[in-house]
């Protein structure tokens, strides 16, 4: 990170990560001078002011499907340069999603180490996406990390899913019309401090990648990045104030790299399996090649006929393939069962919390 004493000013490598918390109110989005990463249902406000971000992200499995038609309309407008979406929404969009602007987050997680082992939230995921696109300095706006879990006008649905059934005051967002009747979404924090801890995890990844991050929301619950005054920054430069806590700090309720966001959909099991495959496949392939060569040499010496040689080689190859397949299947099953047991425990804890509300 840049030293707190140094004044920083806008440059073309910046990216503005637009959370939708109350602190975004009053920010003139059209004045932001470089790439902007907007998300989720903020498109309702963008329509009012006739503005669009350069990039759009929606990583919540339920929110994406709830706003499928509106996201399809954003794609059709061709005013946004790129979309980061989940696999389930891309499948639901069908032919419309066969577009170079659509980035599959689930596929990105499987191939980019920057995303490996982090909790999935749209805000922190958008920040990692910006870094993967080469942005070296990120400015967080509207990332407040403070949520009322069940707002007026919302009703519970299955599991941790909620639905807005009537219009009411909503303290979670910068714009009064952000959520509207019919919107479905997950409980904001299905486990304590989920979003705050997701930003800590992303922050460690970004710091290791040499990406600077500044938080322009002074009342934010995310305290692990230096703070800047956005007005001063945009009008010539701002002197950052130090972060209140180090990125290495982990609270008692912090997530681990093995945990995924129940609300946004865990990708950890898939990521871990992909990482395991990347690490072990070359070794297994090499050992298999050596073993097969030894079998061929032994067979040629013991049974020189071509038929015998072919049979032994095919049998050895089949056994080797079955052994490798069994190894990966076992790993995938263990990861899946481990993830399910965590999610059951988290849901039980959250249900106890809901009963106290």
Image (cartoon, grey):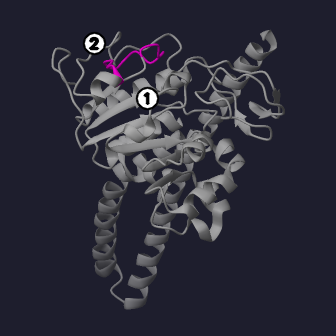
Magenta highlight on residue 226 = yes
Q: Residue at x 50, y 63 (%)?
A: 78
Q: Is residue 154 visible?
A: yes
Q: Residues within 10 Å of mark 2 (few under 14, many from 20)?
A: some
Look at the image and give the residue range highlighted in magenta.
218-230
Quarter of the rendering occupied by the N terminus: top left
Position of residue 213 measured from the top left corner of the image (x, y, whole percent): 31, 28
What secondary structure is marked by label 2? loop
Depth check: give the residue in front, 24 or 259: 24
Q: Residue 75 vs residue 249: left or right?
A: right
Residue at the disc numbered 2: 242
Give the left or right position of residue 220, taking residue 180 as reference: left
Q: Which mark is residue 141?
A: 1
Secondary structure mainly formed by the magenta segment: loop
Residue 256 in sight: no
For the residues marked 1 and 2, what is the alpha-carbon distance in whole angstroms? 17 Å
- At which x and y percent is residue 114? 35, 42
């Amino acid at each position: 990170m840049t030293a707190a004493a140094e004044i920083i000013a806008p440059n073309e490598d910046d990216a503005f990560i637009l959370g939708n918390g109350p602190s975004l109110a009053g920010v003139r989005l059209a004045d932001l001078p470089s790439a902007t990463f907007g998300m989720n249902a903020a498109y309702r406000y963008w329509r009012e002011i006739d503005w669009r971000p350069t990039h759009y992200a929606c990583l919540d499995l339920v929110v994406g499907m709830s706003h499928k038609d509106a996201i399809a309309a954003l794609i059709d407008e061709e005013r946004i340069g790129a979309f980061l979406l989940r696999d389930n929404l891309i499948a639901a969009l069908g032919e419309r999603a066969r577009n170079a602007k659509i980035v599959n987050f689930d596929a990105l997680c499987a191939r980019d180490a920057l995303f490996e082992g982090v909790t999935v939230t749209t805000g922190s995921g958008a920040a990692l996406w910006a870094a993967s696109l080469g942005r070296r300095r990120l400015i967080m706006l509207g990332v407040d990390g403070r949520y009322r879990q069940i707002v007026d006008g919302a009703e519970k649905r299955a599991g941790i899913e909620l639905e807005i059934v009537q219009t009411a005051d909503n303290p979670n967002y910068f714009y009064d019309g952000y959520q509207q009747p019919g919107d479905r979404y997950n409980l904001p924090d299905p486990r304590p401090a989920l979003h705050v801890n997701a930003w800590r995890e992303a922050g460690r990844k970004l710091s290791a990648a040499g990406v600077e991050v500044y938080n322009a929301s002074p009342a934010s619950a995310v305290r692990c990045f230096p703070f800047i005054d956005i007005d001063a920054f945009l009008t010539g430069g701002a002197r950052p104030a130090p972060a209140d806590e180090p990125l290495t700090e982990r609270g008692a309720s912090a997530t681990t790299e093995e945990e995924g966001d129940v609300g946004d959909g865990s990708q950890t099991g898939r990521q871990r399996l992909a990482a395991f495959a990347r690490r072990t496949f070359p070794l297994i392939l090499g050992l298999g090649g050596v073993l097969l060569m030894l079998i061929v040499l032994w067979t040629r010496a013991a049974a020189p006929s071509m038929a015998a040689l072919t049979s032994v080689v095919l049998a050895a190859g089949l056994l080797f393939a079955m052994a490798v397949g069994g190894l990966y299947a076992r790993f995938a099953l263990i990861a899946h069962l481990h993830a399910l047991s965590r999610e059951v425990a988290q849901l039980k804890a959250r249900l106890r919390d809901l009963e106290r509300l």
